[in-house]
Image: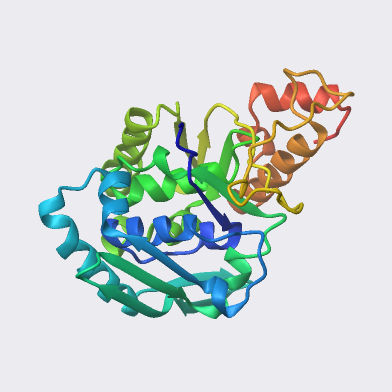
């Protein structure tokens, strides 16, 4: 019987946040999140997720000799980890977990997610990001994983325009990398893009957007993908937790042209970046964008 793929489904606010996690902590948390039902209400019982060390070994191809000690260390350190969320100039800090349990003789770990994270994990109908955990299972860098998550937020448009300060924040980049863009490029961006291309096959391209000599934003382009649709209807079978449904084609839009919603979203992002960098919006538009603008008779 073919194994169903497991998906990570999280709110976009959580995608953009600073996670403050090591690679093993990230692996434990994201596997735990795949056990949650993102369409369910945020009841206390739903905040608890249990995974096994054997699942960690299988999912991430971890050496069994060290897997148990690494899992135990990760579940302990997660209690002191927190995320940082920026909203309207205010930075908020929240714990990842309210409680964690580890039963060594049975090899399972249990996480009770902090209740204030509930809006980013439950009752998700819009503004969420979803991806198959298997796509990042082989990654050895948290930077690669985090960049992949940022890209998946814009999988339908294939374009991520992100102000450099927001990128620093999402990557948890230390001050040594913020002070010198060459260091950020050589130690974070290029290795992350390279690993994503090698491990997942996603053909990512990137460029720095400058205002004068200073980098103001980063632009990533990649092939578009269909978004995961969460099934919020009653299920006849428990296994039908999440399903991928092809997005219906717009009757007014040619398959090769971006939809009206997609190009409006890209225009909004381009305008914001142009204003930030005090430069022309044309800098942030691709040829595909211009084709869609003309097709939908929009004005720049």
Residue at (54, 49) in percent of width and height: 162
Depth order, front residue of 212/269: 269
In the visual, does 122 lie left or right of 133? Answer: right
Give the quarter of the image for residue 125. bottom right
Depth order, front residue of 92/198: 198
The answer, for residue 211, to whether it is visible in the render is no
Depth order, front residue of 225/111: 111
Residue at (88, 24) in percent of width and height: 251
Q: Position of residue 178 (x, y in %)?
A: 34, 58
**Which quadrant is the C terminus positioned in?**
top right
Q: Position of residue 105 (x, y in %)?
A: 19, 70
Q: Position of residue 282 (x, y in %)?
A: 67, 33
Image height of 232 relative to 251, above or below: below
Tell me the colour scheme of the image: rainbow
The answer, for residue 273, to whether it is visible in the render is yes
Image height of 294 relative to 9, above or below: above
Q: Position of residue 292 (x, y in %)?
A: 77, 25
Residue found farthest to the left: 65
In the visual, does 15 lie left or right of 75? Answer: right
Image height of 262 relative to 141, above or below: above
Number of labelled discs?
0
**Which quadrant is the N terminus positioned in?**
top left
Depth order, front residue of 90/285: 90
């Amino acid at each position: 019987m073919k194994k169903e793929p497991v998906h990570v489904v999280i709110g976009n606010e959580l995608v953009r946040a600073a996670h403050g996690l090591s690679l093993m902590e990230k692996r434990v948390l994201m596997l735990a999140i795949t056990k949650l039902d993102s369409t369910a209400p945020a009841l206390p019982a739903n905040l608890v997720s249990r995974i096994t060390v054997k699942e960690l070994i299988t999912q991430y191809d971890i050496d069994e000799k060290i897997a148990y000690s690494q899992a135990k260390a990760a579940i302990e350190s997660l209690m002191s980890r927190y995320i940082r969320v920026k909203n309207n100039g205010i930075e908020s800090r929240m714990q990842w977990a309210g409680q964690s349990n580890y039963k060594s003789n049975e090899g399972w770990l249990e996480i009770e997610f902090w209740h204030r994270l509930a809006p980013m994990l439950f009752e998700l109908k819009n503004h969420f990001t979803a991806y198959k955990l298997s796509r990042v299972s082989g990654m050895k860098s948290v930077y690669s994983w985090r960049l992949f998550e940022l890209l998946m937020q814009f999988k339908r448009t294939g374009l991520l325009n992100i102000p450099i300060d927001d990128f620093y924040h999402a990557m948890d980049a230390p001050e040594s990398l913020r002070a010198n863009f060459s260091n950020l490029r050589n130690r974070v961006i290029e290795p992350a893009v390279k690993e994503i291309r090698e491990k997942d096959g996603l053909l990512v391209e990137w460029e720095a957007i400058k205002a004068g000599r200073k980098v103001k934003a980063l632009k990533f382009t990649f092939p578009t993908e269909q978004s995961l649709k969460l099934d919020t209807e009653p299920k006849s079978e428990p296994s039908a937790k999440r399903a991928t449904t092809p997005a219906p084609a717009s009757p007014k839009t040619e398959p090769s042209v971006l939809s009206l919603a997609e190009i409006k979203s890209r225009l909004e992002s381009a305008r914001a970046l142009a204003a930030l960098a005090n430069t022309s919006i044309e800098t942030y538009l691709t040829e595909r964008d211009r084709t869609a603008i003309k097709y939908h008779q929009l004005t720049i």
